[in-house]
Amino acid sequence: MTTDENAPLRLRAFDLEDLGVVSSMVQDALVPGRDIKYMADEQSFLLALNRFQWESAGDLPPYSRSHAGLRFDHVTHVARRGFGPEAQDKIFALLAIAYHDNTVMLTFSGNAAIRLTVSKLAVGIKDLGTSWPTQWKPGHDPDAKAD
């Protein structure tokens, strides 16, 4: 099987294993606060992302980023921490997505988080448009201590 590493990413997740793949694809995505929306009438939660393309990142630049949409379906409740009134004008870095007992947890830098209550797990991610080069690769200090 051959794949085009420049092809836009499009994935769906319905179980923990698939969600782990989606989570790794959105790690370090930049999310404008104004681009986070809960559509209660559709039971959907949406985020517009500036996604680092981990799947094609080598050891040296240039790297790539792309715009992407991340959608959670069957969402019945949303709780947020660290998303006050000023959140509309902030950029959040998405670190991970986890799932346990009908709860999806989106963890962001700066101790911010969003908890989604879902009736079942259904997540989709889709790259939107073409990617662009970047010289910056997100890094994590393995020796950093949590607060």
Image (cartoon, rainbow, N blue to C red):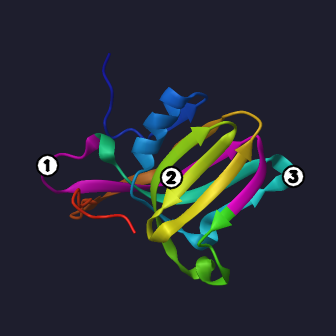
Does the magenta run of residues contain 61? yes
Kind of residue at disc 1? Asp
- Camera-nearest label, 3 or 2: 3
Q: Residue at x 56, y 59 (%)?
A: 48
Q: Quadrant of the C terminus?
A: bottom left
Residue beneath label 2, please?
68
- Give the mark nearer the N terminus: 3 vs 2: 3
Does the magenta run of residues contain 69? yes
Query: In this rendering, would 50 be left or right of 40?
Result: left
Residue beneath label 1, please?
59
Of all residues, the one furthest to the left in this rendering is 60
Kind of residue at disc 2? Ala
Q: Label 3's element?
A: helix
Q: In which quarter of the image is residue 86?
A: bottom right
- Give the mark nearer the N terminus: 1 vs 3: 3
Q: Residue at x 19, y 56 (%)?
A: 62
Q: Where is residue 55 in the image (x, y as percent from the top left)?
A: 31, 40
Q: Label 1's element?
A: loop
Q: In which quarter of the image is residue 37?
A: bottom right
Residue 27, relative to residue 32: is it above or below? Answer: above
Q: Do the residues labelled 1 and 3 touch (CB within 8 Å)?
A: no
| Dot label at residue 41 | 3
Query: In this rendering, would 80 be left or right of 147?
Result: right
Main SS, magenta residues: strand
- Camera-nearest label, 2 or 1: 1
Q: In which quarter of the image is residue 145?
A: bottom left
Q: Position of residue 31 (x, y in %)?
A: 51, 65
Report how far apart the C-alphas of labels 2 and 1 lie in the structure. 23 Å
- Residue range in magenta is 56-79
Residue 114, relative to residue 110: is it above or below? Answer: above
The front one of 9 and 140 is 140
Classed neighbour count for the residue bearing mark 2: other residues with Cα under 10 Å, few (<14), some (14–19), many (≥20): many
